[in-house]
Image (cartoon, rainbow, N blue to C red):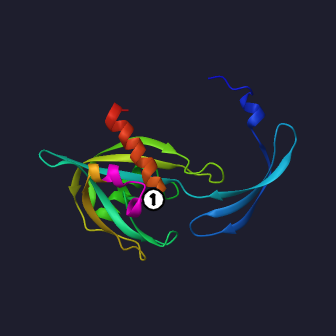
Amino acid sequence: MSWRHAEEAHRWREIERRTVADTPIFTVSASTRRDADQNQGEFVLIEAPEWVTVIPLFEENGRGAEFLMVRQYRHGSEEITVEFPAGAVDPGEAPQAAAARELIEETGYKAAELIPLGAVNPNPAFMTNKTHTYLARGLTKVAEQSLDLHEFVEFARIPEETVLREMGSGEFGNGVMLMSLSFYRRWRDTGA
């Protein structure tokens, strides 16, 4: 594929950035930018921490593949969702370390192996962060849940075919989980 314009023609240069709102979860900024033709505009950005999603996989003979998934209430959608364990990367923490930590905190399980499956920006139109997906294999129960003050999280094993069929609808409606499942399907189908 050949694009008509060079990368430089698409790039905008930041002139100024100011904070509009600073919250415990993210910062909203206004960025004044100029394009290659000297057109100028102001753009809203959400500066959030990196996220991780962990896909805990059980591969036991006779049972078929199963995922260890969590169920919890989400304040943004005001709905209960079924998701893979996930959370924010702490400042100075590597995404893989955050994945291991989130898995233990939310489920009490530890993985013998964490395989990086990919990372994407959840919405590059206005978000500055990435979400990283890891596959967790060789799961062992090592602790009880260690949840934050306002977390109430249940976990259960769910057959792979159920998750593949339901993801993107009903309680499985979290978009970041759908992105992570796409990485898993690529790994399962191609080994990459």
In this rendering, the answer to whether 22 lies above or below 8 is below
Q: Determine the secondary structure under disc 1.
A: loop
Q: Which residue shows up at 24% across the image and 64% down it? A: 143
Report x, y in % for residue 95.
45, 50
In this rendering, the answer to whether 192 lies above or below 134 is above
Quadrant of the rendering where the C terminus is positioned: top left
In this rendering, the answer to whether 73 lies above or below 156 is below
Note whether residue 86 is visible. Answer: yes
Quadrant of the rendering where the N terminus is positioned: top right
Residue closer to the observer: 73 or 18: 73
Dividing the picture into quarters, in which one does residue 84 lie? bottom left
Residue 39: in magenta span? no
Q: Which residue is mark 1?
A: 174
Residue 165: in magenta span? yes
| The magenta segment | 163-174
Amino acid type shown at disc 1:
Asn
Crowding at dot 1, Cα within 10 Å, few <14 / some 14-19 / many 20+, comes out as some
Q: How many numbered marks, from 0 up?
A: 1
